[in-house]
Amino acid sequence: MSSLERKIGSRAIFAIEFSVEPILGKPVNEWWGKIQLWVGGRCVGNPEEVEMVSIGLGTLDAIGKQTGSRGNPLLGSLPVDTAIDNVMQAIYGETGAETEQFSSEDLSKFEVFPVSIPFFDNWEAILLEEGDEERFLYRREGEPGQVVTWDIGTFREITSRANFELTLLQGPSNLIRGTVQ
């Protein structure tokens, strides 16, 4: 069977594109493939990495479901690289990272690319919310950070739709009373 592809969102704003290789007799969460994340017209991550797509999309979907909890005026007032550094250092325990203003527990909800997802190895990203906007701050390790601003909920909407689209690829047997099993 050939690969199945889906494109959700707009590359110019925010999109997730993925392809999977169906394996007969295996559930969709065991299918391997690739993920491309598009942020402001730029492909972010490792588009040639082949892994279990359900892990990458499921993690992004779970992060998206935290929309509404990422307001932090102090973190939002920092330059892009400083904000990313503070989050990454607090989470991963680098020396001098925790300050009176930031703790790893407080800052973990801002991280978008946990180190356990190979699709995004060597990339760092955080989401910040302010009012009706969310800011996606990202960088490839060793490069200067970038920022893109969207309407709040954009990340959640696209990641949720992408994860749902993956479940639909196996067919209607996965849907019971309108929910994915």
Image: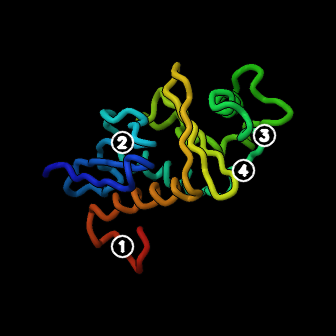
The label shown at residue 175 is 1
Query: Residue visible at 54% across and 42% down?
Result: 148
> Quick one: 89 or 70, which is closer to the camera?
70
Mark before the other along the chain sequence, 1 or 3: 3
**CA separation, marks 1 and 3?**
43 Å
The C terminus lies in quadrant: bottom left
Disc 4 marks which amino acid? Gly
**CA separation, marks 2 and 1?**
26 Å
**CA separation, marks 2 and 3?**
31 Å
Vertical position of residue 111 compared to residue 134: above or below: above
Q: How crowded is mark 1: few (under 14 residues within 10 Å), some or many (20 or more)?
A: few
Mark before the other along the chain sequence, 4 or 2: 2
**CA separation, marks 4 and 2?**
27 Å
**CA separation, marks 1 and 4?**
35 Å
Vertical position of residue 181 compared to residue 24: above or below: below
Query: Residue visible at 25% across and 52% down?
Result: 5
Q: Where is residue 110 in the image (x, y as percent from the top left)?
A: 64, 43
Nearer the camera: disc 2 or disc 1? 2
The label shown at residue 71 is 4
Residue at the disc numbered 2: 36
Where, by quadrant of the figure, is residue 171 drawn? Answer: bottom left
Where, by quadrant of the figure, is residue 170 drawn? Answer: bottom left
> Quick one: 75 or 23, which is closer to the camera?
75
Given contact means CB atoms under 8 Å apart, are the residues at marks 2 and 3 in contact? no
Q: Where is residue 82 in the image (x, y as percent from the top left)?
A: 68, 28
Q: Residues within 10 Å of mark 2 (few under 14, many from 20)?
A: many
Mark before the other along the chain sequence, 2 or 1: 2
Disc 3 marks which amino acid? Leu
Vertical position of residue 51 compared to residue 67: above or below: above
